[in-house]
Image (spheres, rainbow, N blue to C red):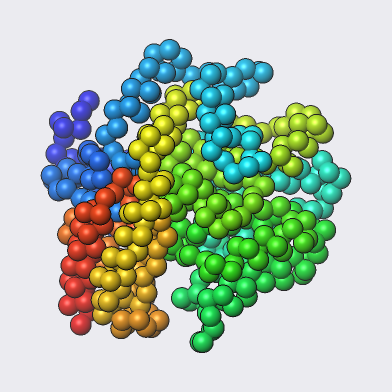
Amino acid sequence: MSYQNYTTEQLQALDNAHHLHPFTDHKQLRSDGARMIVRADGPFIYDSDGNEILDGMAGLWCVNIGYGRDELAKAAYEQMKELPYYNSFFRCTTPTPVLLAAKLAELAPKGLNQVFYGSSGSEANDTAVRLVRHYWSLEGKPEKNIIISRNTAYHGSSITGASLGGMAAMHGQLHGAVPNIVHVMPPYSYEFAHAGESDHDFGLRAARAVEDAILEAGADKVAAFIGEPVMGAGGVRIPPASYWPEIQRVCRKYDVLLMIDEVITGYGRTGAWFGCETYGVEADTITTAKALTSGYQPLSALLVGERISSTLVEKGGEFYHGYTYSGHPVCCAVALANLDIIEREGLVERVANDTGPYFSKVLAETIGKHAMVGETRSIGLMGAVELARGNGSRERFDPGQAAGEMVRDHAVANGLMVRSVGDTMILSPPLIWGREHVDMACERLSRALDDVAARLG
């Protein structure tokens, strides 16, 4: 039955009665009612009240090619007609995951030429943990199983993903995390840099936290370090240029594998196909999802380097791991069509050479000068705005004031979808944005900041 047979209020009532949302205070939601997004086109989404909203979050970091792409609908339809589903078990496969794996090996950094499929970034990170620990066991070092991550990192919502991540609130609801995961400080200079400390020196200090953790545990016990090239859900925390080269050096020194989580940064977000290329990092595994299909279908792909894959093939026997929907033929068909659009329209190059630099410039020159803004930062088409008590300051608002939530709500009311992480406002728009969309977003966010500044006095 079509949703058009229902009023917004009726849909909200059904939502309240039956639907549990992710990352939601349900008591508050059921008091206010959910916003019903009913259609989308290009860079815009539309709610059931007819409001047009510029999508500054690409759905949830994923709709890189924008909405309403007929090619992806056609790819899904044609694959569903021919073969809607078959599994990759029983020594079987289907053509589209094979072709997609070959395409990903072509696009991926050198040496990452094997692919394991799932349906989400959480599943892909679960697979990465299983695979890395299994690798060391096959190499005769089962005790080398500690994984180092970072505080405020986000690596998914499954038990393993939440354990890998460094979100304290998520850990509080686990009531028993996956063992042998250690967290260290993040490369977040706005919060943790010392007065007068240069970005270069802070980056080295943040990287040394990883080395200290390796030495404390013993290098013979540490399997891998996992990190997002840019910490996305934690608040678009962009590391200093000195950070990742030092991480690479440390991992090589102690023979620690490097797991790169590119669920957010993969497929063009930073102005390169993969964020690790932006920072010159050589990974052993790369976790991808989201923009692999631009969110049109649920699909993840773990890219695996030769060191791990060759051991798995030669020494591993049966790998007791997999999902019903690993290599789903429809999802893989959509991914192939999506990657073709990204290549054909030059979206990665566009972000690197045009819209990314313009976004950085306009964000700094307009939003960065607002009285409520402590800092703006961006890389490619992802950016953050730190709210503060005074331009250029690091003095936070009182938590009870909920400044970030207020700015988010006023931005949506002004026609811009943004996200708040505490008092950090984040933007991660579709890669199809042009300069006019950047201008539109900054103008609408500026109005929202004015509205909230007036309310907070």
Q: Residue furthest right?
A: 140
x and y, in percent, of residue 316 in the image: 79, 33
Q: Residue furthest bottom?
A: 196
Residue 58 visible, this orientation: no
Q: Residue shown at 27%/62% (left/top)?
A: 408
Q: Is residue 190 left or right of residue 150?
A: left
Q: Nearer the viewer, residue 59 or 336?
A: 336
Q: Is residue 129 above or below residue 438?
A: above
Q: Is residue 37 above or below residue 222?
A: above
Q: Residue shown at 22%/25% (left/top)?
A: 1
Q: Residue shown at 44%/25% (left/top)?
A: 333
x and y, in percent, of residue 188 in the image: 51, 71
Q: Nearer the viewer, residue 423 or 67?
A: 67
x and y, in percent, of residue 456 in the image: 22, 79
The quarter of the picture where residue 297 lies is top left
Q: Nearer the viewer, residue 101 or 349?
A: 349
Q: Is residue 116 left or right of residue 236?
A: right
- The quarter of the picture where the C terminus appears is bottom left
